[in-house]
Amino acid sequence: MPKVPDSRRIGRMAVNEVRALLERHGHIVQETDGSNDYGEDLHVTFVEEGQRTENAVLMQVKGGVSVRTRRGHRVRVGDHAENWRDGSLPVLCVVHDPERGGLFWANATRQLRRAQALRKSLRSIVVAADSVLDDARLEAFVQTMRRRLSREREGVCRWADMADVEFAPDDIVKPFENEVFEPMVFWQRRGDPYSVLLHHDLDWEPIRIKEEMLRFQPLPSVGHIILDDAEAHWLLGCFKSTGWWRRPTERPL
């Protein structure tokens, strides 16, 4: 009789655990046929109050001790980097390790985008030991992913990933590309007296800026950052259109 390899059993257990968790909470899970598995095992559509939402993710599922590290797990990227980073849906890596507590997850798309911003090649996705996926934490996980998907549709989630920051739902986020297609982002949090500039040429390091720092002569600049004329005028428009969001907010005692 032909022997069924252990790797298949472990892989099936992992996929079944993820599917069972998501379907137990009403979400729609479509499994990729084995012959068409090119790095994503599951297509997951989130459901809210019995209604299918517009939010979906892809999942790569792994199991067994082969992906363990001392502090968590690692999933090899292999030749999936471009697809996981630049695909139309975010890709999550989920690891099943019952001896360590069950399921753990990481956002592969975000990690690969951050590596790109740092001009690094990422060989593995890091799955932290505290990123647990279970019944108690699933709702928070789903809401986190739905907020991110909303920002993806706005075209700004990529820049948050590159800068390794999180945009709150009520943040004002204004993207811009200069004439050589270098992206940058103006970011205003409610009640903050300053704004934040995320800039391709600054390796996406968040820089605090204020309107009084903006200069047009002798060279367009904001603080120590040299701009071109279009960038300076764009920033001026951003400052003028968001002044009301910088007003102090009342804080509870």
Image: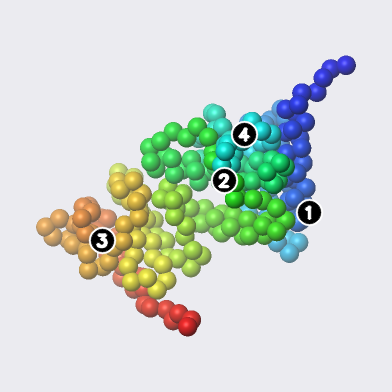
Left-right relation of 252 to 43 = left
Which sits in the foreground, 139 or 36?
139
- Label 2: state its secondary structure: strand
> Which amino acid lies under the numbered mark 3 shown in the image of this protein?
His
Q: For residue 93, which quarter of the picture?
A: top right
Number of other residues with Cα within 10 Å of mark 4, as a class: few under 14, some 14 to 19, many 20 or more: some
Q: Give the percent coordinates (x, y) of residue 141.
A: 63, 56
Of the numbered discs 3 and 1, the one sitting upstream in the chain is: 1
Q: CA distance from mark 4 to mark 2?
A: 12 Å
Disc 2 target residue: 128
> What residue is disc 1 on?
24
Going from N to C along the chain, the mark reached first, 4 or 2, is 4
**Could you tell me how far apart the alpha carbons at marks 1 and 4 are, in whole angstroms?**
26 Å
Secondary structure beneath disc 1? helix
Q: Amino acid at mark 4?
A: Val
The mark closer to the camera, 3 or 1, is 1
Residue sitting at x 47%, y 35%: 122
